[in-house]
Image (cartoon, rainbow, N blue to C red):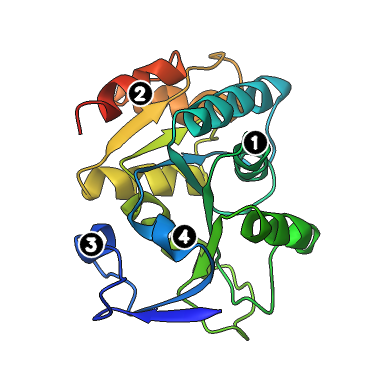
Amino acid sequence: MEIIKYNDERYPQSLKNIYDPPKVLYCDGNISLLNKLSVAIVGTRRMSKYGEKITRIFSSELSKNGICIVSGLAKGIDTIAHENSCNNEGKTIAVLGSGFNHIYPKENNSLYKKIVEDGGLVISEYPPETSPEAQNFPKRNRIISGLSFGTIVVEAPLRSGALITADLALEQGKEVYCVPGNIDSFRSAGTNLLIKQGAKPAISFKDVLEDVAFT
């Protein structure tokens, strides 16, 4: 594990530009990814088959195009995004809401190890012994969006951590993309609302690639 402080030359400029940047980053893995072109993929822990399929497509294709995938190592959409990036020889960054000695959820400890072994990066602003307390997760979302060019929300109910990430991305001046879903699905209620409010519909991963090409 390495510790990168705010005044360290390795500290990512993208985080220096957000409100309340983390003072310290605890890092395990490929630190160069902190300054790599990245896109966040987030969504509900209780994904549908549709959400899983779309996450696989987006994370795989963006990885193949050299874009680093950022997410939160949570169950559901986050897990699929990280796994598919690794499986397609891509790079991924997982942002924890706990310390390294308390990986959450516990069943993703093997995924954490796989990310590092495959040249990815796991980071946290919390000291290693920090437990996964509820208030930590909404706070860490500013890091997920802050590291990324834009945030893709695949599926999100109206009360969802993914919507918090989307709101933070907008506050940071970042792009927000939402995958449209069935209007009668609670899992898509949040994403459909964001589209109604002006977020970019993500019909294809190419919608993101086209924007990235102009950065």
Q: Which residue occupies 48% across, 29% down?
A: 62
Describe the element under mark 1 as helix, strand or loop.
helix
Mark 2 or mark 1: whose residue is earlier in sequence:
1
Q: Using the numbered discs, state the Cα–Cα distance from disc 3 to disc 4 in whole angstroms.
A: 22 Å
Please indicate, yes or no, whether residue 86 appears anywhere in the rendered image. yes
Tell whether 76 sits left or right of 126.
right
Bin the neighbour count of mark 1 within 10 Å (Cα to Cα): few under 14, some 14-19, many 20 and up.
many
Q: Nearer the N terminus, badge 2 or badge 4?
A: 4
Count residues near mark 2 (Cα–Cα under 10 Å), then give few for <14, some for 14-19, many for 20+: some
Q: Residues within 10 Å of mark 4 (few under 14, many from 20)?
A: some
Is residue 198 at all visible to an observer of this figure?
Answer: no
User: Is 185 placed left or right of 174 in the picture?
Assistant: right
CB-based contact (under 8 Å), mark 4 and mark 1? no
Q: Circle 3 — which element?
A: helix
**Residue 57's spot in the image, x, y percent?**
59, 22
Quick one: SS at disc 2?
A: helix
Q: Which mark is residue 138?
A: 4
Q: Are marks 2 and 1 in contact (CB under 8 Å)?
A: no
Total tally of numbered discs in the picture: 4
Residue at numbered disc 2: 209
